[in-house]
Every structure is written in structure tokens, then in C-alpha cells.
Image (spheres, rainbow, N blue to C red):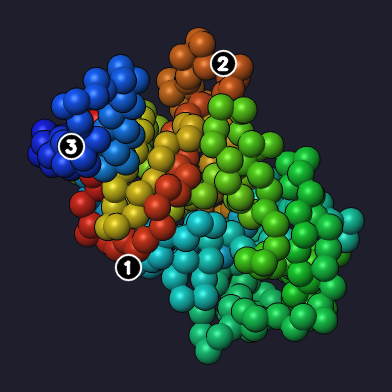
Amino acid sequence: MDCPHRSAMGALGSLLQARFAVLHRPALPRPAWLGVAAVALGMVLWRRARPRRCRRLQQVGTVAELCIYPVKSCKGVWVSEAECTALGLRSDHLQDRFWLVIKEDGHMVTARQEPRLLLVSITYEDDCLVFQAPVVGQLALLCKLPSSNKIHDCRLFGLDIKSRDCGDEATQWFTNFLKTEAFRLVQFRKNMKGRASRKVFPSFVQNCQVAYPDCSLIMILSEAPLADLNTRLEKKVKMDQFRPNIVVTGCDAFEEDSWDEILIGNTEIKKVLACPRCIMTTVDPDTRVIDRKEPLETLNYCLCNPDEKPIYKTSPLLGIYYLVEKIGSLKVGDPVYQMVQ
């Protein structure tokens, strides 16, 4: 990408010459400060006229799959295209992690505590989320909730967030399915205040709002590191065990670790952190029973550098978290460009 600095400086030089010619009087010596002021003004105008950054685009892969997880810890919905909003991916009324299961006291419930949540599938029909799970059958829930529904103070990873209750029918459905205690389903609305990423991430991360994701808006994982991992495992693992939003093909294993800023479609995203992996990856995709060992034990070859241990500790890393720098849209088949300075 060419930077038009030379042409911009030439045009600005002509502009400044014309503007300051009127100040020239042969009979009167020009004060010394006037030349300094002209140079200073010229620099200000040049800085305003130049591009913010000159970056070239280097294709590093192609979007293979897109996935939205409407309810935290429930099954994902694979889509062919999506909007990338300030709060994550959206397709129609399916917004990534805008619904959450909680206990009666407001604390979140995930598959770490209730792995059977991963058996709950979700579709979108006629302005409704349609839930399906073994034994309990189907639940249809309007995406737009009545404003009279109760607002809960919920707790996620030590941070509070407001959420609107989805009603008693949803409460009964999830309670009947999980069978351990009473659970409620709540929804985040765009007019609510999300959790501040600065309170989730280390202090060096730029601030943004997140709803119910663990700690970031977008997670990218390429096919190559999953294939590499499967060469080391007796029982192969699937992509959905790692719950990425964007799956990339056409790159080498762990190449995404070096992608600081990415352009997909007209969406720009910026790297935040590597994704520390937890016990959820050990849930069997068919039985939803927690193994508690694999693939985590084998993933120990994916540890952080020694200087990053204060951030990641001993967690194995797979995939990269991103924040949204420029909202837009993207689709399966889009080239993935690294934006290089």
C-alpha cells in the first residue's frame, strides 16, 4: 500500500507558499518567529492530511467456518456469514453469548459445572430461539423479552453484570434438564453495561465491553494446530471442543500466534491474548462426560514463554482472542489478511 506523503507534502508546500506570500513585505524585515510558525503550521497540516497508518495486506489464510454460541456453554450454531459488532459476532437475532444460565443467586453456570449444557442445541425460527435437548424436548423462547421481566445482578468471574430474566418456562425447562438444582436463563441487552475488559484482562489490554464470553469478543483457531494435536492423541478431538468463532484454513500450525491485526471482509480485529485452555476441552463431544485429562495433558507442549507465566500460569494455549477494532461483516470463504506495518 503506497503512502502519498511526497505528493501531500508538495501540495501543502504550495498551499503554505501561497498563504504566507501575502505576509511578505520587502520594506519590512520578516520576524524570525514567522518562519518557525510557518514550519509548525505546515507540520500540523501534513500530520492531519497523512494516513493514520500505512499497512500492507498479507493473506495468511481463508475463513473455513464461522460459529456463534448464543447461550454460554450450549452448542454453537455454524453460519455461512455474520456481522462483527462491537459485542461480537451476530447472525440475524443470534448474538454470540448473549444468553446465560445462572443459579438462583445470580452466579453463572457453565459446562465446567454442568457438562450436559453442551447437549443443548439451538436454532432460530420466527423471532424465537428454539432449544432442543434429550428427554425434555423443545422450548421456543422469544428473542425480544418483555420489558417487565425481572433484571438480575449476575456474577461472572468475579464481575457483576445486569441481565434480564427469560421467564419461568425457561427456568423450568433448564431445571428439568439439568436436574441438580433450580436454574434460570437470562439475556444481555445492548442497552445494558457489559463487563470492562480491563477488569478481565491484564492492564495492558485496551478497554472494551464484553457480555458473557469468558474474556474476549472473538476467538480464532486454525485447522492446522488441531491436526497437529490429533497426531499426538490416541482419541482424536474435534474443533467444536475448542469453541472457536472463526476457523481458518490454509496456514501452518500456530501461525495465528503472530497475527496481531487482521482484516476479514471489511472487519478489523486486534490480537489480545492467547486462549488458555481449561477442563471444558476434556468433555467428550458424544457423551458430554468430563474426562478431566485429555486433551489437556497432551496440550502441555503448547505452554507459554517463561516471561508470560504471570498471565497464563500453567495453562496450555490453543487459539487467539481478538477485540473488534472496526465493525463490519464477514463470511465463509473470505481471505484472512494480516495487516503489516
Q: Residue at x 79, y 67 (%)?
A: 184
Amino acid type, mark 1:
Ser
Q: Position of residue 324 (x, y in %)?
A: 45, 49
- In the rendered image, which residue does mark 2 sit on? 309
Q: Position of residue 26 (x, y in %)?
A: 16, 27
Point out the tag, 3 or 1, that comes first from the N-terminus: 3
- In the rendered image, which residue does mark 3 sit on? 21
Q: Marks 3/1: CA distance? A: 60 Å
Q: Residue at x 31, y 25 (%)?
A: 34
Q: Marks 1/2: CA distance? A: 37 Å
- In the rendered image, which residue does mark 1 sit on? 80
Amino acid type, mark 2:
Lys
- Kindly report which numbered mark, 2 or 3, lies closer to the viewer in this rendering: 3
Point out the tag, 2 or 3, that comes first from the N-terminus: 3
Q: Position of residue 148 (x, y in %)?
A: 82, 81
- Horizontal side of residue 178 vs 339, given as left or right: right
- Label 3, secondary structure: give it: helix
Q: Marks 2/3: CA distance? A: 62 Å
Q: Quadrant of the C terminus?
A: top left
